[in-house]
Amino acid sequence: MGADRTDTPSRAEICAALAQELDIAAVGRRFGLSRKDMGRLFNEAAALFEKADTGTWRLYVDGASRGNPGPSGAGAVLFNPAGHKKGEVSQYLGETTNNVAEYQALLHGLKMALNLGVKNLQIMADSLLIVQQLKGAYQVKTPHLYPLFSQARETLQEFNTCAISHLDRSLNHEADRLARQAIDRHLGKK
């Protein structure tokens, strides 16, 4: 890039300057970059964003309750398309039922995914009830679950693609651990 500078600026320096100044021409002059250099930089950035948007991320969710109702927690773990963990949630929910905890875990996980800009999502949950309700195979007959169900359905619409699958509880150990950890933290256990 830039024929006028002897030291080549890093992409991070240029992007930081653009974020601060928001004046493309001034940043180009500051770093001695031609229009062609700036165009290449923007094309590289666009390619990175496009790559991040195209893969399918995996979200594992689980709710836990000690008693039904009882002290409850939500756990969620998010993996990018390459299989790297990019976020997790461990949230104490107070006294509630296991099904409420399952929906809350899903909602916390969806919020995390949206905050990271995820567009394509595969959700994995060990609650057959929640999975089948969201797929439309089971009706939501419990009145206190309907607002959570509605909120989940509405939030799912914010993704370009989204699917939910049931998995065996033994394969959801990390989300389960986070849900139980939230309860233990609240109850003062290690």
Image (tube, rainbow, N blue to C red):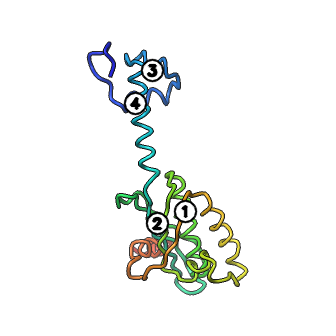
Spatial separation of the CA atoms under disc 2 and disc 3: 39 Å
In terms of secondary structure, where does tag 3 sit?
A: helix
Which residue is rendered at x = 51% and y = 79% of the image?
Answer: 64
Which residue is rendered at x = 46% and y = 66% of the image?
Answer: 59
In terms of secondary structure, where does tag 2 sit?
A: strand
Comparing 122 with 12, the one in front is 122
> What residue sits right under mark 1 in the picture?
110
Q: Earlier in the sequence, mark 1 or mark 3?
A: 3
Which of labels 4 and 1 is toward the front? 4
Spatial separation of the CA atoms under disc 4 and disc 2: 32 Å
Q: Residue furthest right?
A: 143
Looking at the figure, which quarter contains the N terminus?
top left
Crowdedness of circle 3 by 10 Å Cα count: few (<14), some, many (20+)?
some
> What residue sits right under mark 2 in the picture?
59
Name the disc covering residue 41, or none: 4
Is residue 47 positioned above or below 40 on the image?
Answer: below
Q: Amino acid at mark 4?
A: Leu
Q: Earlier in the sequence, mark 4 or mark 1?
A: 4
Q: Position of residue 144 (x, y in %)?
A: 70, 78
Q: Amino acid at mark 1?
A: Leu
Crowdedness of circle 2 by 10 Å Cα count: few (<14), some, many (20+)?
many
Comparing 190 with 124, the one in front is 124
Name the disc covering residue 27, or none: 3
Q: Earlier in the sequence, mark 2 or mark 3?
A: 3
Q: Position of residue 75 (x, y in %)?
A: 48, 70
Q: Position of residue 187 (x, y in %)?
A: 49, 75
Q: Earlier in the sequence, mark 4 or mark 2?
A: 4
Q: Position of residue 63 (x, y in %)?
A: 52, 76
